[in-house]
Amino acid sequence: MTTKKTPKPAAKKTTRGRKSQTVGESIIQGLQEAIAWTKGENDNVRVTLVDVPEVDVREVRLKMGLSQAQFATRFGLPPATLRNWEQGRSHPDAPTRVLLAVIAKHPEVVEEVLRKAS
């Protein structure tokens, strides 16, 4: 397998003599590094893995004293999906588990964000 080095975009000089990139150049460089890493061409990059917690949705809901319908409405979840999670027929995906973990610890923050978004 041959590896081809992709030239990095030229850095710009600032008034202090430090090199800086434009936002676009930084994004392009990051994407090039990510592509190289997925091809096994560059192992000198930092990769952060996050352990997404498992959340007992029913326990969180009951701790808040809410019915399924109330919990689903309050946090913008489909009631049928919530029922399926609680009954074990399906499981929340990773991003939803992150949201549920935040709801479990700080429901008021999620409610505030949702209020401001609507």
Image (spheres, helix red, strand yellow):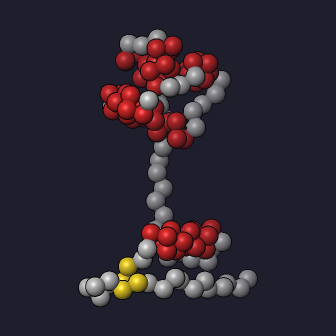
Question: Residue most toward the bottom?
Answer: 17
Counting every numbered tag in the picture gives 0
Which residue is located at x 50 percent, y 20 percent? 72
Question: Residue most toward the right?
Answer: 1
Q: Which one is in front, 44 or 14? A: 14
Eyeballing the image, is 48 above or below 96?
below
Q: Is residue 45 visible?
A: no
Q: Is residue 82 visible?
A: yes
Eyeballing the image, is 17 above or below 23?
below
Instruction: Report x, y in % for residue 92.
Output: 57, 33
Instruction: Report x, y in % for residue 96.
Output: 52, 36
Instruction: Report x, y in % for residue 107.
Output: 36, 28
The answer to which quarter of the image holds residue 90 is top right
Which residue is located at x 66 percent, y 72 percent? 39
Eyeballing the image, is 32 above or below 64?
below
Q: Which one is in front, 48 or 106? A: 106
Which residue is located at x 46 percent, y 59 percent? 48
Instruction: Report x, y in % for residue 45.
Output: 49, 72
| 98 sits to left or right of 84 | left
| 5 sits to left or right of 54 | right
Which residue is located at x 73 percent, y 83 percent? 1
The answer to which quarter of the image holds residue 82 is top right
State which quarter of the image contains the C terminus: top left
